[in-house]
């Protein structure tokens, strides 16, 4: 699964405040990212896979000491598949967002939305059933944000190209008993059906 994630992170730096009256009413500044402290966040995709969120080159600082930035990034990850009910299966994919640097941060999720309209669209094989997010705490670790996406496989392709031909072929096999024995076509008919079934199974594997 590949997502285009839009992040907006903000944190308070009490030592970077000023009075508006002392600076002609200037309420914000644009700072270079390397000149101030920035938190480090990683995207947890599994037990082994993770990567850091890339910060932009500049941050916005307002007079209250609030630093913020907006950034978008592609997130690609693999989902553990349960194919017991294939092709009528529903899969659950998830990943987490957690801080990896000191000091320990108290994360708070203020807004989350998942939108597949516009220029972004879901694949033709799957469609989104539900998306949720929550704050999770495990043991002594700090809080982290967990995102969960539930997707379901579209059935039209599999019904038309896989299930329907196999059902139709199965219904044709008993018709061999209605062919008169004198015609001599019983054997050729059943061989033709079995051959077409074998070729079809080989194509869809």
Image (cartoon, rainbow, N blue to C red):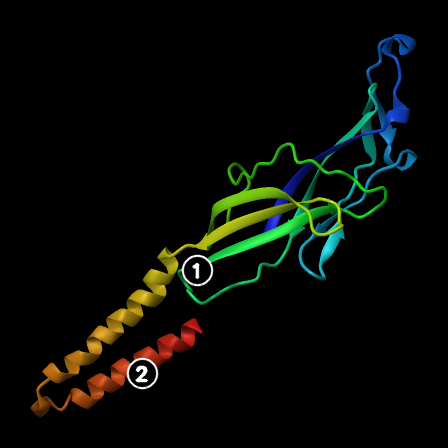
Residue plotted at (35% across, 67% down) = 162
Residue 25 location (% of width, % of height) = 84, 9
| Mark 2 Cα-neighbour bin, 10 Å: few <14, some 14–19, many ≥20 | few
Residue plotted at (41% across, 54% down) = 154
> Looking at the picture, does residue 155 appear above or below residue 66?
below
Residue 17 location (% of width, % of height) = 88, 20
Residue plotted at (21% across, 79% down) = 173
Quadrant of the rendering where the C terminus is positioned: bottom left
Q: Pointer 1: what residue?
A: 89
**The one of 192 and 94 positioned closer to us in this rendering:** 94
> Looking at the picture, does residue 197 appear above or below residue 128?
below
Q: Give the quarter of the image for residue 184.
A: bottom left
Does residue 21 appear left or right of residue 80 in this picture? right
Q: Secondary structure at mark 1?
A: loop
> Looking at the picture, does residue 34 appear above or below residue 158?
above
| Mark 1 Cα-neighbour bin, 10 Å: few <14, some 14–19, many ≥20 | some
Q: Pointer 2: what residue?
A: 195
Q: Secondary structure at mark 2?
A: helix
Q: Earlier in the sequence, mark 1 or mark 2?
A: 1
Marks 1/2: CA distance?
30 Å
**The one of 3 and 82 positioned closer to us in this rendering:** 82
Does residue 103 appear left or right of residue 82 in this picture? right
Residue 65 location (% of width, % of height) = 84, 24
Residue 90 location (% of width, % of height) = 46, 56
Does residue 175 appear left or right of residue 85 in this picture? left
Q: Is residue 121 visible?
A: no
Quadrant of the rendering where the N terminus is positioned: bottom right
Residue plotted at (76% across, 50% down) = 140
């Amino acid at each position: 699964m590949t997502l285009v994630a839009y992040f907006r992170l903000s944190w308070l730096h009490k030592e970077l405040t000023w009075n508006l009256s002392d600076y002609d009413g200037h309420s914000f500044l644009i700072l270079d990212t390397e000149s101030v402290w920035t938190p480090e966040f990683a995207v947890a995709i599994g037990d082994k896979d993770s990567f850091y969120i890339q910060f932009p080159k500049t941050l916005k600082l307002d007079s209250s000491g609030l630093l913020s930035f907006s950034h978008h990034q592609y997130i690609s990850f693999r989902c553990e598949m349960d194919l017991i009910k294939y092709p009528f299966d529903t899969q659950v994919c998830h990943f987490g967002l957690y801080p990896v640097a000191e000091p320990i941060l108290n994360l708070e999720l203020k807004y989350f939305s998942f939108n597949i309209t516009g220029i972004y669209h879901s694949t033709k094989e799957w469609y989104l059933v539900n998306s949720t997010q929550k704050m999770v705490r495990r043991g002594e670790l700090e809080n982290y944000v967990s995102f969960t996406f539930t997707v379901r496989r579209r059935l039209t392709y599999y019904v038309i190209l896989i299930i329907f031909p196999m059902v139709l072929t199965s219904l044709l096999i008993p018709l061999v008993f209605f062919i008169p024995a004198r015609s001599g076509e019983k054997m050729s008919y059943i061989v033709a059906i079995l051959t077409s079934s074998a070729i079809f199974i080989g194509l869809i594997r």
